[in-house]
Structure formats: structure tokens, C-alpha cells
Image: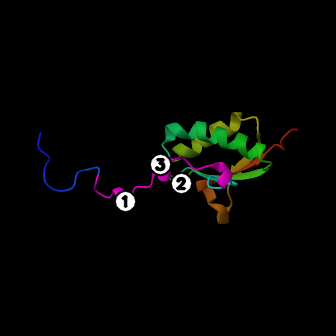
Amino acid sequence: MAKRPGPGPDEIDADLLDASAADPPDPADGAAALTDELDLHGFLPRDCAGLVGEYLGAAQGAGMTWVRIVHGKGTGALRRIVHQVLDGHPAVRGYQLAGERSGSWGATVVELHPRTA
């Protein structure tokens, strides 16, 4: 079969592709550092329960005692999912909607139990 004239798909912008860009970030590099805030914008509701649970465990393991989860205001669907996870998670000491300057009812502030040795 004859080759069509012009650059092929493997030749277009090949210089822009960086093989290392396909690799996931290495936490040792600090690229995926854990912070005291989890922003759920952009996540599907079906993924949020597991994500929040994992985040809470990691935050407690890192020694954090307070975190903020941003779920947005919207219809309240993400807020309900987040609060359902918080109600049953062993790391959670308590939670409340964020204050007016911290996201109001679009975010939840969570107090975590201190990590155990």
C-alpha cells in the first residue's frame, strides 16, 4: 500500500510529546503533595465517596487535624455524598459547613481525630 503524501500521525507534533509526561507524578518529587483542602470540582459524584474516604485517611495519617472539603453549592448532591462519608468515617471527629469566608455552604470543614501511633 502506498504512503499518502504529507506527514503521518506519528510525525505530527512528535517533538511536542514528552515521554516523561505520560508517567504519573512521583510523590517523592512533591508533585502530588497532600494539602488540607480537597476540591471535588471536576469529579463525578460516583467517584467522590471513595476519594473522600481515601483523602481523610491520608490526611489523618499525615497528622492533620482539620481539613476543608470543597463540594460546591450546586444542587447539594456532592454535599450529601460528602456528609454521608463523614458520618461513617472513623477518622472524623466532627464537621460543619464552612464559614462565610471559607466557602459557606459550598465547603465543609472537618475535624479529624489525632492519628494513633
**Pointer 3: what residue?**
22
CA neighbours of label 3 inside 10 A, class few (<14), some (14 to 19), many (20+) = few
Q: Position of residue 45 (x, y in %)?
A: 50, 41
Contact between marks 3 and 2 (CB within 8 A): the answer is no
Q: Amino acid type of disc 3? A: Ala
Which secondary structure lies at badge 1? helix
For the point 37% across and 59% down, the residue is 15
Q: CA distance from mark 3 to mark 2?
A: 34 Å
21 magenta-colored: yes
**Pointer 2: what residue?**
73
Which stretch appears magenta? 11-29
Which secondary structure lies at badge 3? helix
60 left or right of 100 in image: right
- Residue most toward the left? 2
47 magenta-colored: no
Q: CA distance from mark 3 to mark 1?
A: 14 Å
- In this orientation, which residue lies closer to the viewer: 13 or 109? 13
User: Of marks 2 and 1, which one's residue comes earlier in the chain?
Assistant: 1
Q: Amino acid type of disc 1? A: Asp
Kindly identify which numbered label has been placed on residue 110: none
Contact between marks 3 and 1 (CB within 8 A): the answer is no
Q: Amino acid type of disc 2? A: Lys
User: Of marks 3 and 2, which one's residue comes earlier in the chain?
Assistant: 3
Which secondary structure lies at badge 2? loop
**Pointer 1: what residue?**
15
